[in-house]
Image: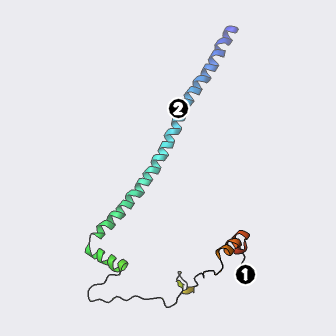
Amino acid sequence: MTLVRRPLVILAPAALLLVALALTTNVLPLRQILAQRQEIAATQADLDALVSNNEVLAAKVEALQTPAEVERLAREELGYVRPGEKAFVAMDPTPGRMDTSEGAAPVAVEEPVAESRSFFARMWDFVTGRDLVTSG
């Protein structure tokens, strides 16, 4: 009876060791392969985005080679005019800034008034927290 048990005692741990060895040699590389495939897919997506951006920039460069585009940009961004033309500049009639948000009527925004208090008084207010309290 000991002869029958002995091969089983030796065979069972050997089989477990073989299975563990197979898992370690096959599962870990499989994880690495899957991670590398995901990385390749992400890098390919980045490459596609860069290629499309490069095409847009190449189109802009090509457009800038034409005299008409150069003239258009000079007129829009630099305010150039042709000889004989008159340029007009519209000035804001209010002394304050204008808030021209979309859908809102232009409303003058008051500029912050410089405080007449000394630096040390303002610093003390900051330290004590009085600068956070609004008077009124």
Q: Pointer 1: residues within 10 angstroms few (<14), some, or many (20+)? A: few
Q: Are marks 1 and 2 in contact (CB under 8 Å)?
A: no
Residue 126: x %, y % from top left? 69, 71
Q: Amino acid at mark 2?
A: Asn
Q: Amino acid at mark 1?
A: Ser
Residue 11: x %, y % from top left? 62, 17
For disc 1, the marked residue is 135
Residue 20: x %, y % from top left? 59, 27
Local SS, label 1:
loop
Task: Identify the mark nearer the N-term, 1 or 2.
Answer: 2
Local SS, label 2:
helix
Marks 1 and 2 sit apart, C-alpha to C-alpha, by: 73 Å
Left or right of 2? Residue 81 is left
* Count of labels in the image: 2
Picture layout, residue 95 above or below residue 34:
below
Q: Give the residue displayed 54% in from the left and 35% down from the top.
A: 28
Query: Observer-nearest residue: 122 or 132?
Result: 122
Q: Give the residue displayed 66% in from the left and 15% down from the top.
A: 9
* Rendered-image quadrant of the C terminus: bottom right
Query: Observer-nearest residue: 72 or 41?
Result: 72
Picture layout, residue 110 above or below residue 49:
below
- In which quarter of the view is residue 130 placed? bottom right
Q: Give the residue displayed 29% in from the left and 74% down from the top.
A: 70
Picture layout, residue 132 above or below residue 95:
above
Q: Pointer 2: residues within 10 angstroms few (<14), some, or many (20+)? A: few
* Rendered-image quadrant of the N terminus: top right
Badge number at residue 26: 2
Query: Observer-nearest residue: 73 or 38?
Result: 73
Residue 16: x %, y % from top left? 62, 23
Left or right of 48? Residue 29 is right
- In which quarter of the view is residue 63 placed? bottom left
